[in-house]
Every structure is written in C-alpha cells, then in structure tokens.
Image: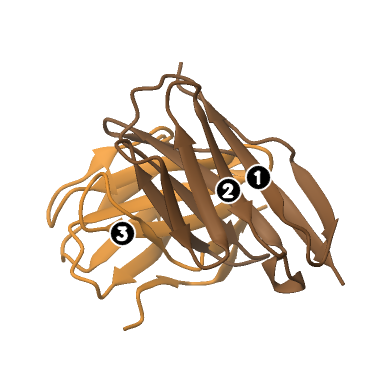
Chain colours: A orange, B brown
Amino acid sequence: NAGVTQTPKFRVLKTGQSMTLLCAQDMNHEYMYWYRQDPGMGLRLIHYSVGEGTTAKGEVPDGYNVSRLKKQNFLLGLESAAPSQTSVYFCASSQGLAVEQFFGPGTRLTVL
Amino acid sequence: KQEVTQIPAALSVPEGENLVLNCSFTDSAIYNLQWFRQDPGKGLTSLLLIQSSQREQTSGRLNASLDKSSGRSTLYIAASQPGDSATYLCAVRWTDKLIFGTGTRLQVFP
C-alpha cells in the first residue's frame, strides 16, 4: 500500500496564478484533510472531508477550495495564489474523526 | 481558547540518554492525543495515540502518558539513538477540532 500520496512535491507560482494539489489514499478512509505548516505556527487545518462528495471548512479556509469527487482523492485548489500562501501543504486521511491520522509527504509551494 | 504548547522548542542530548518531551494543553475535555515524528522535509509519522480514557501507551522504546486533569502529556524515549533525531509533534483533539503543537526539535549526537 502506498498510503497517502501527494502531487506535486514542489511548485513555484507567480502571484495570481492558479493550481491544484492532488491527494490520494489507498486505505479506503472516509475522512481526508488538508493542512498547511508554517514556521513557528504548527499545522493548521484548511479544509476537510467526511466522505465522498462532502467538504467542510477548517481553521484557515480563505483563498482555497477543495473537492472530493472520489473517495480516494481530495483536491486542494488555489484560484489566485498570493505570497501569504507560501507554505508546506500536507494531506492526511483517517477512518474516523477521532482516530489516528495518516499523513502524506507534503507539497512545498512558493508563491512569488 | 484551546491551545497546545510544546516546550522546549529544541533539545540536544548525547546518545544513550533517556529523555522526556512535554506537551501541555488547555481545556481538559479532550477526545485523544497523538504524538508524531517529522523528519526534515518529510511528512508526519504517527507514533502513539492515547484516548482520553487511557493513561499511557507504549511502543518499543517510546512511552506516552496522559494526565488530563493537569493538561499534560509526556513522550518518554528510552536509550536515545542518533536515528531518533527529528521533530516531535503532539496533536490534541477536542470534539471536531485537532490542534497541533509547534513541536520539539530533537538532536541525538553520538
């Protein structure tokens, strides 16, 4: 099993450009999450999904959109990138809400 | 406001030492607490998950304890090795919210 995978691993954008980050999991988990990690701030939840076709806002959702069209995939979109969105983005999945979360390797995004 | 704090931010110890990493949290009404390891440039690896009804969990050289009443958890690493060098994060779950600490960066030198 690959676990949780993320595409791409690195990306550089110019301000105003758009992009989509892909997260895939092969553990048949219901819950999926997108976090961002910034120095000195810990991981913060952007959006999450409790099942196929559902999405919900987390702590820092502004400037991001998500979609969960298939159970195994969770997409994070930036419609108009800003330098404040420079960060490392992590996807995670879990079978339930209060159980162990499994993380992907991360995507390092730089917005110039 | 629910917060998670990890002190110290960094720790450097010689190989073989037993060490304790600390995690403190406000609001004792937690569901569970999870300890993670993060290597530089990598994702998070789950180490131990303690449910609110448990006092401790063990995995190999790792032992995590939980004291809800005092809002504290400790991660004990026995006989530390250079391969234990990483950042250790704790994450606390309250109802539908999971909050991460900023981590303790551990270096174990030979």
From what the image shows, is residue B55 above or below residue B14?
Answer: above
Q: Can I make out residue A81 in this image?
A: no
Find the residue positioned furthest to the bottom: A1
Do dots 3 and 1 share one subunit? Answer: no
Image mark 2: chain: B
Q: Which residue is mark 3?
A: A93
Residue A91 spot, x, y in % from top left: 40, 58
Label 2 near label 1: C-beta < 8 Å?
A: yes
Q: Which residue is mark 1?
A: B21
| Residue at horizontal 35 percent and vertical 56 percent from the top | A101
Real-space Cα separation, disc 3 to disc 1, in angstroms = 26 Å
Kind of residue indicated by mark 3: Ser
Q: Horizontally, is A84 left or right of A28 in the view? A: right
Kind of residue indicated by mark 2: Leu
Query: Which residue is more in the foreground, B3 or A46?
Result: B3
- Closest to the camera, between mark 3 and mark 1, is 1
Kind of residue indicated by mark 1: Leu
| Residue at horizontal 35 percent and vertical 66 percent from the top | A23
Q: Horizontally, is A71 left or right of B51 in the view? A: left
Q: Can I make out residue B60 in this image?
A: yes
Q: Horizontally, is A96 left or right of A38 in the view? A: left
Query: Which residue is more in the foreground, B42 or B10?
Result: B10
| Disc 2 secondary structure class | strand
Lower position in the chain sequence, tag 1 or tag 2: 1
Residue B75, numbered circle: 2
Real-space Cα separation, disc 3 to disc 2, in angstroms = 24 Å
